[in-house]
Image (cartoon, helix red, strand yellow):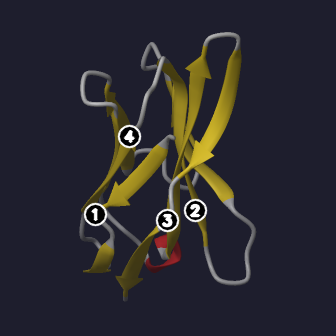
Amino acid sequence: QVQLVESGGGLVQAGGSLRLSCEVHGNIFRINAMGWYRQAPGKQRELVATISSSSSTTYADSVKGRFTISRDNAKNTLYLQMNSLKPEDTAVYYCNAEIMFPGRRYSYWGQGTQVTVSS
């Protein structure tokens, strides 16, 4: 069984920083791409950032220059460093991982962590 466990969310003032972590637990063959998504109240879930197995990254325009996605393959952990936070960054943040098994692959989601940015 595979589990993604997120941590690091919380309440922060505008302009502040937070670092999210997502640990992948379980009997894993290999982790391919990983990503962070977020969902604000009343809105659809949106992509924040992705990182490939070779650490190539992509970002939503709204977070470019402020957020940094990274991964530690030895620890099966994904990170999101969020700087210069804005009230519009308030959302539940979810991590996602594409995990390989012999002959198949599945997409897994974390349970979400709340990020609230006050003005």
Front label number (3 vs 4): 4
Q: Which amino acid does label 4 sit on?
A: His
Residue at label 4?
Answer: 25
Quarter occupied by residue 75: top left
Residue at image x 37%, y 51%?
66
Cα separation, mark 1 vs mark 4, equals: 17 Å
Q: Of tags 1 and 4, which is closer to the observer?
A: 4
Q: Which residue is drawn at 70% across and 10% down?
A: 103
- Could you tell me if the residues under marks 2 and 1 are in contact, i.e. CB atoms within 8 Å? no
| Mark 1, other Cα within 10 Å: few <14 / some 14–19 / many ≥20 | some
Q: Distance between the residues labelled 2 and 3?
A: 8 Å
Q: Where is residue 90 in the image (x, y as percent from the top left)?
A: 48, 76
Identified by mark 3, the residue type is: Gly
In the depicted view, which residue is nearer to us: 27 or 44?
27
Q: Mark 2 is on which residue type?
A: Arg
Between discs 2 and 4, the one toward the N terminus: 4
Circles 2 and 4: CB atoms closer than 8 Å = no
Looking at the rendered image, the disc whose residue lies closer to the viewer, 2 or 3, is 3
Compared with 76, 1 (above or below) is below
Rendered location of residue 67, percent (x, y): 39, 49
The circle on residue 8 is: 1
**Which tag, 2 or 3, sits closer to the chain's start?**
2
Q: In this view, does 78 lie above or below 116?
A: above
**Which numbered disc covers residue 75?**
none
Which residue position holds label 2? 38
- For the residues marked 3 and 4, what is the alpha-carbon distance in whole angstroms? 15 Å
Mark 1 secondary-structure assignment = loop
Name the element at disc 3: loop
Q: In which quarter of the image is the C terminus?
A: bottom left
Pointer 1 or 4: first along the chain: 1
